[in-house]
Amino acid sequence: MRILITGSNGLLGQKLVGQLSKNEKLSFLATSKGENRNPSCPSENYSSLDITNSDEVLKTITAYSPDYIIHTAAITNVDYCELNQLECERVNVGGTKNLFESSKKIGAHFLFLSTDFVFDGEEGNYKETDHPNPLSIYAESKRDGELLLIQSNYSNWSIARTIIVFGEGQNLSRSNIVLWARESLSLGKTLNIIDDQFRSPTWADDLAWGCIQICEQNRKGIYHLSGPETMSIYELVIRIGRFFKLDTSSINRTDSSSLNQAAKRPPKTGFDLSKSKKDIGYQPKTLEESLHLLS
Ligand SMILES: NC(=O)c1ccc[n+]([C@@H]2O[C@H](COP(=O)([O-])OP(=O)(O)OC[C@H]3O[C@@H](n4cnc5c(N)ncnc54)[C@H](OP(=O)(O)O)[C@@H]3O)[C@@H](O)[C@H]2O)c1
């Protein structure tokens, strides 16, 4: 089985490369914009690919002829997307369209990474069948990507939605909340952390495992893949601090209105994971179980 990954320089992309390298049943081609920045990805498994270039996308996909495409590449900075709408749409929607069209041409399964932000966060504990209502440009771009698949008459696709992904990678273009909180607390910084947004932080290795299972088990449709616990961002940062035995007395509670962020966020997400547990055997680690595995 041949798998092509987009966004292999990103956090999830790096975890996919790590797991696929160890799986003798699968071969893979890792792609990302520009040079390979993942030292764990062998150069013979890497090809540079800008997903906004439709000719390049078709050429790469036709030449490699994968059975599965795991599409992780995206502009993931939510506030940047809010301020750069056209660029966000060009990459997150246009790039997805280029890849999906090429998948259809060669009959490959297309797995698209999406987000809890497709929901408005009024209810929480979302099921795959719940009704999306995106609140930001980033969220809309991801929902538009989903709709390309859902409204198509080509059925060989899946969507994996996830929530705040964390873990360690190499030469990442952006950090994540766990690394940021550990670093900031170890430097003794004062942190003002919101207590009115609730999320289920996701260990990147669990998410990568879930994506590979969707491919290996040839599952189709929408899957929710997040961590198993929903907590406020404040609780998350406190638990990170306590786990690493750092002083948490400088963590202050605040609320979203104090942040003046460009993009609106859903107050409470979190997923009902019943379908993923039942169908693919997804068993995500708790926050502390994951933190144990960080170096
Ligand atoms: N991280 C989260 O908390 C989170 C939450 C919900 C959903 N998701 C979704 O999960 C997926 C993976 O997230 P992640 O955390 O691994 O993201 P990430 O670390 O930001 O990686 C995304 C990768 O996409 C690449 N990319 C951007 N534009 C590209 C283009 N035009 N052509 C090719 N590659 C391009 C980036 O390249 P550069 O490194 O060169 O910029 C980056 O390596 C994304 O689709 C995201 O929307 C993530």
Image (cartoon, rainbow, N blue to C red):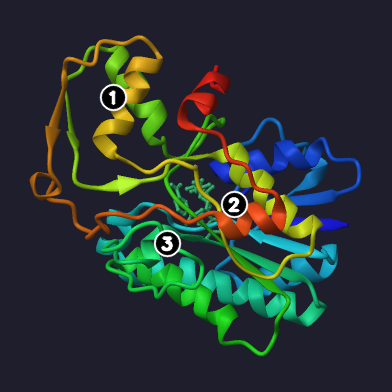
Residue 293 visible within the image: yes
Nearer to us in this view, 116 or 59: 116
Compared with residue 120, is residue 149 higher up or lower down, i.e. above or below?
A: below
Left/right placement of residue 44 relative to residue 240 reads right
Residue 87 in sight in this render: no
The residue that mark 2 highlights is 7
Residue, x 57% and y 56% (percent of image)?
274
Q: Residues within 10 Å of mark 2 (few under 14, many from 20)?
A: many
Left or right of residue 50, residue 280 in this image: right
Q: Amino acid at mark 3?
A: Tyr
Q: As shown in the figure, which amino acid type bears the numbered disc 1? A: Ile
- Mark 1 falls on what kind of element? helix
Label 2 sits on a secondary structure element that is loop
User: Label 1 crowding class (10 Å Cα cut-off): few <14, some 14-19, many 20+?
Assistant: many
Residue at the (70%, 49%) spot, across then down:
281
Residue holding disc 3: 126
Quarter occupied by residue 136:
bottom left
Give the labeled residue for mark 1.
238
SS at mark 3?
loop
